[in-house]
Image: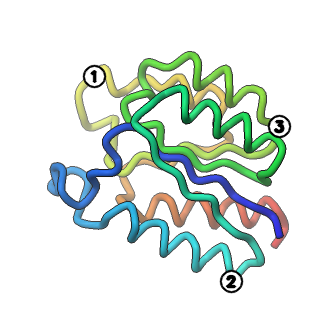
Amino acid sequence: MQTVYILNGPNLNLLGKRQPEIYGKETLQDIEVACGQIAEANGLKVRFLQSNAEHQLIDWIHEAREDACGIIINPAAYTHTSVALLDALGTFERPVFEVHISNVHKRESFRHHSYVSLRADGVIAGCGAQGYELALLRLIRLLGR
């Protein structure tokens, strides 16, 4: 069974508790369950991971090179700062989708730039937690499932 890596960056472990007016009330576990159900219904499995450490996200991207049919990543604050994540994603030869819960373009100007977008095959922002599901559905379509 093919695996989709869903990677989550810093502070996303606090979803549902941190600034719900921006990020909503869903928890990361809620998102994991929803994505798992969609994946299973389409013959896929998800490896759902979160870290506050940039190097851990990079290690998982490297791992995905061998194991994954696609990556969905919410790099959170690393979106705007991490050339290292961009470089790691550049080594992954299958689809990559960037997800942001909030509409980063309606927020502070420093959030308008994304290094990750330079590699992403698609970007979903401002759709709340549903953005993960939308990215997964797009990946499923690309895989021909």
- Image quadrant for the N terminus? bottom right
> Which label belongs to residue 41?
2
Q: Nearer the viewer, mark 1 or mark 3?
A: 3
Q: Secondary structure at mark 3?
A: loop
The amino acid marked with disc number 3 is: Glu
The amino acid marked with disc number 1 is: Ser
Residue appearing at x 35%, y 59% in the figure: 128
Give how far apart the Cα atoms at labels 2 and 1 are: 39 Å
Q: Is residue 26 left or right of residue 121?
A: left
Q: Which residue is mark 1?
A: 109
Please report whichever mark, 3 or 2, sits nearer to the chain's N-terminal start: 2
Q: Is residue 113 left or right of residue 134?
A: left
Q: Is residue 8 left or right of residue 127?
A: right
Query: Do tag 2 and tag 1 residues touch (Cβ < 8 Å)?
Result: no
Give how far apart the Cα atoms at labels 1 and 3 are: 31 Å
Q: Residue furthest bottom?
A: 41
Give how far apart the Cα atoms at labels 3 and 2 are: 25 Å
Q: Secondary structure at mark 2?
A: helix
